Image (cartoon, helix red, strand yellow):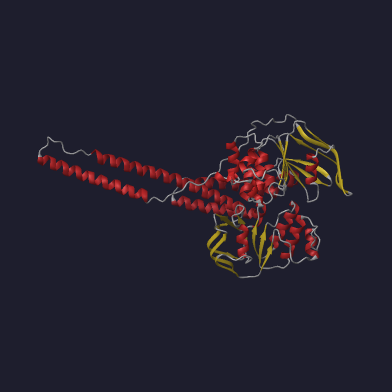
Amino acid sequence: MLLIELKDIKKYYGIRLILDIPELKLYSGECIGILGSNGSGKTTLLDLMAKKLEPDEGTVNLYDKSGYIFQLKHPLEKAISPKWASKLSIPDKWSDTMSGGEKTKFKIALELEKNYPLMFADEPTTNVDIESISVIEEMFKAYKGTLIVISHDRNFLDKLCTQIIEVEDSKVKIYKGNYSDYKAQKEHQKLRAEFEHEEYIKEKKRLESVMSQTKQKSLSIKKAPKRMGNSEARLHKMGGQKQKAKLDKIAKSVKTRIEHLEIKEKPKTQSKIHFDIQGSEKSHSKILIEAKKLNKSFAGRVIFKDAEFAIENGTKTAIVGANGSGKTTLINMILERDEQIKVSKTAKIGYFNQELKILKPELSIIENVMENSIYKEDFARLLLARLLFRGESVYKKAKVLSGGELVKVSFAKILLEDINMLILDEPTNYLDISSLEVIEEALIDYDKALLFVSHDRKFISSVANQIIAIEDKKLKLYRGGYEEYLYPINKVSNKEKTKVEEEIILKNRMAEVIGRLSTQISIEDKARLDLEYNEILNKLRALG
């Protein structure tokens, strides 16, 4: 059933065109994720669909009742049922003293218990701990209506979405499947575009060569020598001119073919960020930070009781635990050099959180990041470009940047400083997925010690090689990645192992299919591979 219809939509902010949508139709039974960089118009699109905002041009038709889970606004209704409150471990009455995560869960419960056939949600997992995100996912899975959601949580988008809407350069495009399907299709498109661009360049060069050679042949046809008689000259001229005319006609035809070639633009590519040690002095200590019998209490509440931990040089450690368990407390104790914690004398710690104000308002972006940088400006510009600060935009002053832009520039500044250990507290909140993945890529390649707190499961899984879990007031170390922490080898059933193995095989085959599709193949082979590609996507989706 048709639920939402947008026709000839234009929406401006000032003179800037944010959205230009000739037509968009959305149907019931789907879970639709909206993606795009910060400022691209994601929330504007969501508000237009929900009729919370009017377009400057065009019409929006909403054909059923809907609820809206706001990211920032407080709810008008201040109570939820005890059943929902118990399910989410939150109070059943709204209070301004609730944590950010509790407020988010309260707003979700408030809308879901109305059981409307359509639900809009703007970042429904923000400030929510990992355990609660899993509960929210199950709540949305059980919801029988249509969900349209903005989220930068890639695991969330993978588990729930059946469609992705990408907002880019004021346009929207729909992709079938979840986030991983969307990424695979984008990679497929990129490889295909690269192949088509290369073929276009080759064909253009070939035709230009043919045209050049043909013109040269035409010019090389000589006039009749003076010593020839009139009759011989006429015969020579007739034959030569006919040949010349034929060659000129061929050259003109080839020129027309060149002019009518469909131009295939080279797709945009992003340079990989690789951090060399350069001028920073790497710590030679095996253990950078450690504590034994660590104790901490607040207002009579015990946070840590005889806890112990150690951070080895070169490790990438994620701290996980429920909200309020002490993740940020542990980081603050390290930064404040609590007497119970031993920090290596050679450790040079860089610290980042999204509330940190380290930029000078009157300095430009490039001046701020280069202020204490040990890297050359070319590298700083590369990092900034990947964070969507390109060309002249690096000369914008910090005082005119948006909140999300300030976060990205602050992160770049710290990453470029003379440090040999990096501590991050929720570095990914409010970042768009493309910026998040750039930061993720940089940290995967980062060759020094890293300690961080994040609720983003995909980010933890990609970056961390060990986990410190806060459990029962203790700090328990799990060596290996996030998956090893979630599914210890001795707890994994044979069925789960088979599922993982099957997923690996399917993903490897998908990579092969994408590779084949990017080469010059027959129409029949392309059709067969496209079919296999879709079959693999469906099997991966079924595995969940």
Q: Nearer the viewer, residue 205 or 138?
A: 205
In the image, farthest residue toward the right: 300
Query: Residue 518: image x %, image y %?
Result: 49, 46
Q: Is residue 133 left or right of residue 365?
A: right
The quadrant of the rendering that contains the C terminus is: bottom right
Q: Is residue 374 left or right of residue 8?
A: right
In the image, farthest residue toward the front: 362
Residue 447 visible? The answer is yes
Q: Nearer the viewer, residue 42 or 80?
A: 42
Query: Residue 183: image x %, image y %?
Result: 58, 50
Note whether 422 is above or below 539 in the view shown.
Answer: above
User: Quadrant of the rendered structure where residue 483 is?
Assistant: top right
Residue 544 visible? The answer is no
User: Quadrant of the rendered structure where residue 166 is?
Assistant: bottom right
Note whether 259 is above or below 273 in the view shown.
Answer: below
Query: Residue 181: image x %, image y %?
Result: 59, 53
Q: Is residue 196 left or right of residue 297?
A: left
Query: Residue 454: image x %, image y %?
Result: 72, 47
Q: Nearer the viewer, residue 216 or 138?
A: 216
User: Quadrant of the rendered structure where residue 488 is?
Assistant: top right
The quadrant of the rendering that contains the N terminus is: bottom right
Q: Is residue 154 left or right of residue 392?
A: right
Q: Total marks drawn?
A: 0
